[in-house]
Image (cartoon, rainbow, N blue to C red):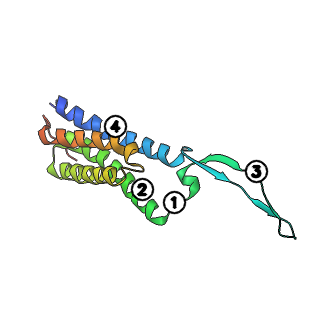
Amino acid sequence: MRRGIGGLQWIELLSGLAACLVGLLALGYALFAPLASYTSGSDTCTSDGVCTRGPDVHGRISLAQSGLSSEARFFLSVLVVCLIVVAISAVAHSLSGKPDWRAWLWVSTIIILIFVVLGALSIGPFIAPAGLLALVAACFSLGARPTTPARL
């Protein structure tokens, strides 16, 4: 007879899933919300060399609209993969208890926390809640033991 998973496993499972969801939503907000503002204007010059300043145009632009370098796209992709790995490994470890899943959970959590620290002045504050939830899942994986191991 198979019993359900215990309280620690539920915390690990839900924290891992929440870390992925919160992280992906935060990245979406940081990339696509109009968080930056800009001002542009133009000068009009006549043939005799007299230039007049045109009206300034003000607006808001998202990070994705301003253009991302290939390096930024690469690192954001690594972050997305790590968020997904946290969710998968937290669920798999909470159900099976296999140490391989715990290792994946810890490695991806550490990488996410590195992103939070290195991005402290840019996207770090947006993904910090996801990093903390991933850390909660990883910490609870140390004490979580399934009552009946499932095959994964």
How far from the left and from the top, in percent, is residue 40? 67, 54
Q: Earlier in the sequence, mark 4 or mark 1?
A: 4
**Mark carried by residue 76:** 2
Q: Earlier in the sequence, mark 4 or mark 3?
A: 4
Q: Amino acid at mark 3?
A: Pro
Label 4: element kind: helix
Q: Is residue 105 left or right of residue 49?
A: left
Q: Pointer 3: what residue?
A: 55
Q: Amino acid at mark 2?
A: Leu
**Mark carried by residue 39:** none
Q: How busy is the neighbourhood of tag 3: few (under 14 within 10 Å), some, or many (20 plus)?
A: few
Vertical side of 2 occupied by 20: above or below: below
Q: Earlier in the sequence, mark 3 or mark 2?
A: 3
Q: Within the image, what quadrant is residue 9 found in? A: top left
Residue 150 in view, yes or no: no
Q: Is residue 52 left or right of residue 142?
A: right
Question: Which residue is at a point 22% across and 47% down the rendered structure image?
Answer: 152
Label 2: element kind: helix
**Mark carried by residue 18:** 4
Label 3: element kind: loop
- The Cα atoms of the two marked residues, 1 and 2, are separated by 10 Å
